[in-house]
Image: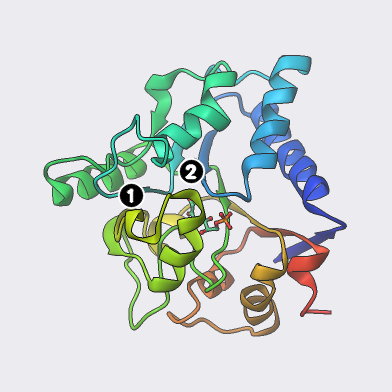
Amino acid sequence: MKVIVRENYDEISKLCAQIIASKVKEKPDLILGLATGSTPIGTYKELVKMHKEEKLDFSQIKTFNLDEYVGMNKDNPNSYYYFMMENLFKWINIDLKNVNIPDGKALDLTKEVEEYENKLEKSGGVDVQLLGIGGNGHIAFNEPGQYLNAKTSVVELTEDTITANSRFFNSLEDVPRKAISMGIGSILRSKEIILLASGKSKSKALFEFLTKDRVTTYLPVSFLHLHSNVTVICDKDAYSLVE
Ligand code: F6R
């Protein structure tokens, strides 16, 4: 595993965007796995800038997002679909037919998760998967617990995650309790993984992950030890407990 530590959030965002841009140039029909949340916003801003200033071309890329809240309409500002439109898709020349995000409003959620996993498989697999990390060590919405799902599934969010994500909602009660999330197996099938981490709130989970060469369902990010092409890009605050 490669670990890159940079001074601050701006620097990790720039570096991550540069890496993604170079992959898109190398393979114009790249399949990108995307995350939401605060962490990738800076990376998306940089990619938008590269599209505007350097004509970075996204016309042939395909994307798969990690997750979506259950019960959330696409046009709800808290949906991950809306997030992706506002932070990236609206500003680049991506073909929206190539965008895949689980449908949190699907009437048959069992069918939706099965179809999402099948679509992922049929696509030939994600080339580069961008991941954030929860303060509790979750990746996508694979929460710490007795077991983890291998495939895309409907999952219950933990109290930690509900509290952490309530910053985007009017109140704690408004945060959905369930989400559709790619499973650990779905994530590990990506050819390459970039994990982005910023800030002190991620330092404990990152410490547990980077300093212990073992895998546990109580720290979902630890499953990245089983993948042979992972790059962790973090700022000094996130890395602070490791040093
Ligand atoms: C979002 C996702 C989550 C976030 C994680 C960190 O698509 O999969 O695992 O990456 O909760 O969120 P932020 O970046 O808001 O700290």
Q: CA distance from mark 1 to mark 2?
A: 21 Å
Q: Residues within 10 Å of mark 2 (few under 14, many from 20)?
A: many
Residue at the disc numbered 1: 69
Q: How is the image coloured?
A: rainbow
Q: x, y percentage for residue 238?
A: 73, 67
Quadrant housing the C terminus: bottom right
Q: x, y percentage for residue 48?
A: 67, 25
3 on left or right of 213:
right
Q: Tag 2 or tag 1, which sits nearer the N-term?
A: 1
Residue at the disc numbered 2: 126
Seen at 43% across and 79% down, the residue is 217
Seen at 42% across and 76% down, the residue is 144
Q: x, y percentage for residue 99?
A: 41, 29
Q: Residues within 10 Å of mark 1 (few under 14, many from 20)?
A: many
Q: x, y percentage for residue 96?
A: 42, 21
Q: Secondary structure at mark 2?
A: loop
